[in-house]
Image (cartoon, helix red, strand yellow):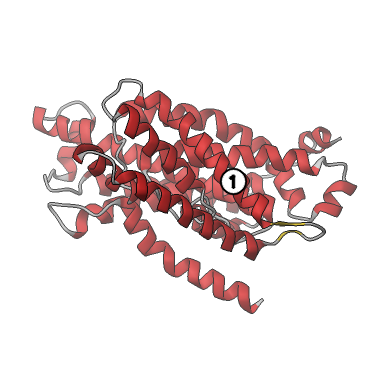
Amino acid sequence: MDSHIGKSYPRKTTGRNLLVIGGGLALLLMSALGSMNTGYSKILPMDTLRTLLGGGQPREELIVFSFRLPRIVLSMLIGAGLAVSGGILQGITGNPLADPGLLGLNAGAGLMVVLYVMFYGIGSSWTVFMLPPLALAGAAAAALLVWGLSYQKGAGVSPVRMTMTGIAVQAGFVALTTLLVVTLDDTQYGFVSSWQLGSLWGAKWSFVGSLLLWLCILLPLTYRKAKILDILRLGDETALGLGLLVSRERRRLLFLSVALAAACVSVSGSISFVGLMAPHMANRIVGPRQHIALPVGALLGAVLVSVADTMARMVIQPSSLPTGVMVSILGAPYFIFLLSKREKE
């Protein structure tokens, strides 16, 4: 019966929603153009456009196509994936504070990345293929741990308890990762330190292709579950009354969320708050119906990470802050606001 529910879902897209999506795409384009003209090596906007159309000088083509463009595309893919992952978590847990980073998924994925670096280094040609599934295993272990420690018989999973447990599990995984880091050589240590701060270390076309492949599989599967997310938000009793197999669907959605977060973290490093802010903003703009909130959240997440990455490269030129640090600077006040609002309610 639950499959029938999903198929019969009326997915109306109003003119206002189309306008919101168009505005999000325009913001995404502007952030991309702004990012392409930001950096230590200055390229004028018209020169950038000429280079994109195939008429640039060798130096300009090297900067745009080999360094800036893959980083821009990767930041947008990461933002979209983390935003949808956070939206799923908030839907299946009923926890408006749920975020892949805050619930320890990023830290679990990071631990597996560090273990891989310890044994195989970062120069292997297999790295681009091995990191996403390894990160998935680590994120899944963290998700199971948080869920198990948060569950109370007869009461289910409390949103606040899950958030506090996730923060504790994240701290534990980070501590274990730090213990392993001291055994690394200088090259490995530099990579791991950069990864932990969210440096978009995998900003190469090979990693763009790898992440894009994962997102092309996972995002459509998630969108097909939009109606299921809407029903789960009504509560378990209502969902059961509508014929939904709640436990099974929640497990499937949790797997999709974990897989999205792990794939993004494997190439971006640890980036928090995107999965918290983007779904909240989308729900406030277009409402809670997930068939429109999910794509709008993905657009907002892409814009958020792209803008944060651009700002990170502008602050201390010629060096740059890790993108994850800049996202945290933007996201921490928003999290505190939501937490205080939640406590008042």
Residue closest to the eye, 6 or 325:
325
- The picture places residue 12, in percent across and down from the top left corner, at 69, 44
Q: Position of residue 48 (x, y in %)?
A: 19, 38
How many numbered markers are drawn?
A: 1
Q: Quadrant of residue 211?
A: top left
| Vertical side of 38 occupied by 67: above or below | above
Label 1 is placed on what type of residue?
Ala
Q: Which residue is located at x 68 percent, y 50 percent?
A: 92
For the point 46% across and 41% down, the residue is 109
Q: Nearer the viewer, residue 10 or 15?
A: 10
Q: Name which residue lies at 14% across and 55% down.
A: 317
Task: Confirm whether residue 102 shows in the render.
Answer: yes
Vertical placement of residue 137 versus 181, above or below: above
Q: Which residue is mark 1?
A: 143
Where in the figure is residue 179, as x and y percent of width and height? 36, 48
* Residue 46 relative to residue 27: left or right: left
Figure quadrant of the C terminus = bottom right
The quadrant where residue 284 appears: bottom right
Q: Quadrant of the N terminus?
A: top right
Residue plotted at (26% across, 26% down): 123
In percent of width and height, residue 33 lies at 28, 45
Which residue is most to the right? Answer: 241
Q: Left of 257 or right of it: where is 75?
A: left
Left or right for 12, reference 296: right
Crowding at mark 1 (Cα within 10 Å: few <14, some 14-19, many 20+): many
In the displayed structure, 3 sits above or below 176; it is: above
